[in-house]
Image (cartoon, rainbow, N blue to C red):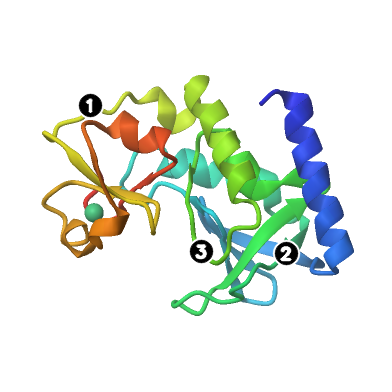
Amino acid sequence: MDQTHWRHGALLALATAFLCGLAWGEAVKSVVDGDTVELATGDRVRLIGIDSPERGELFYDAAKIYLKDLVLGKAVRIERDADTMDSYGRKLGYLFVGRTFVNGAMVYAGLAYASSHPPNTRYEALLFAAQRDARAARRGLWREQKVSDERFYVGNLSTHKFHRPSCEWAAKIEPKHQVRLTNRVQGLNLDLTPCRSCKP
Ligand SMILES: [Zn+2]
C-alpha cells in the first residue's frame, strides 16, 4: 500500500466515522504504552485491533514515543466498534487526529502488530494491509528477523493468534480452528498474531 492509498484508507475511515455519528472529540492527557492512552477525563482507551510491544520488549519505548507524538495534548476523535469496554474496564476505540488514523499509523510504522479482536473488526482488513506493508519494508519491529526456534507452531483460525506448541492456549484450540505452521513466517502470512503469553 503506498502513501496515497494509505491516506485514502484513512479518509475513508474518517468518512465512515462521520456518517455513523460515532466520533467525538477528547483530549489525550497521557500515553500509557503503544496501544493505550489516558484521556483528560481519566478514562483509559485501548486502541482496537493493534498490539504494541509490552514493557521490557523490544520497541516498547519506540512505540510509546511514536504514539505520544501522534496524540499527546491533541484533540482526538474516538470511534467505537461493537464492544465499548474491555475486561479491564478500559474503553475500546479507534483514534483519529486530523486525517491520521492512529491505530493504522502505529501498525504502518511497524510499532504494533495488527490483531484480530472479533467482534471489533471494522478496520481489520486495513490494519492487516498496513502490517503487510510494514513487514515488506521492515519497519520497526519487522527489522528484527526473529528466528523460528520451534519445530512447528500452532495457529488458531478463530482467535487469529499463533502459539508455541507448549503453550497452554495451543492445547485449547478446537481441532476445526487449528492449523499447524512450520515456521513463524507462515503464521504471519496468514495474518495470525503472535500470542502474548508464549511469545512465539
Ligand atoms: Zn501462546
Mark 3 vs 1, N-terminal side: 3
Tally of numbered tags: 3
Q: Name the residue furthest top.
A: 137
Q: Is residue 169 visible?
A: yes
Tag 3 secondary structure: loop
Distance from disc 2 to disc 1, alpha carbons, whole Å, reads 37 Å
Q: Nearer the viewer, mark 2 or mark 3?
A: 3
Q: Is residue 70 above or below residue 79?
A: above
Residue 103 is situated, as x and y percent measured from the top left of the image, at 62, 49
Three-letter amino acid code of the residue under disc 2: Glu
On the image, the x and y values in percent for residue 127 come to 59, 44
Badge 2 crowding class, 10 Å Cα cut-off, few under 14, some 14 to 19, many 20 or more, is many
Distance between the alpha carbons at the discs numbered 3 and 1: 29 Å
* Disc nearer the start of the sequence (2/1): 2
Tag 2 secondary structure: strand
- Viewport quadrant of the C terminus: top left
In this view, the residue in front, 199 or 156, is 156
The image quadrant of residue 168 is bottom left
Give yes or no for contact between labels 3 and 1 (Cβ–Cβ under 8 Å).
no
Is residue 197 something one can see in this rendering? Answer: no
Q: Residues within 10 Å of mark 1 (few under 14, many from 20)?
A: few
How crowded pointer 3 is (Cα within 10 Å; few <14, some 14-19, many 20+) is rated as some
Q: What residue does disc 3 label?
A: 118
Disc 1: which residue? 147
Question: Residue sitting at 66 percent across and 26 percent down?
Answer: 1
Task: Identify the residue under disc 2.
Answer: 79
The kind of residue tagged 1 is: Val
Label 1, ligand 1: CB separation under 8 Å:
no
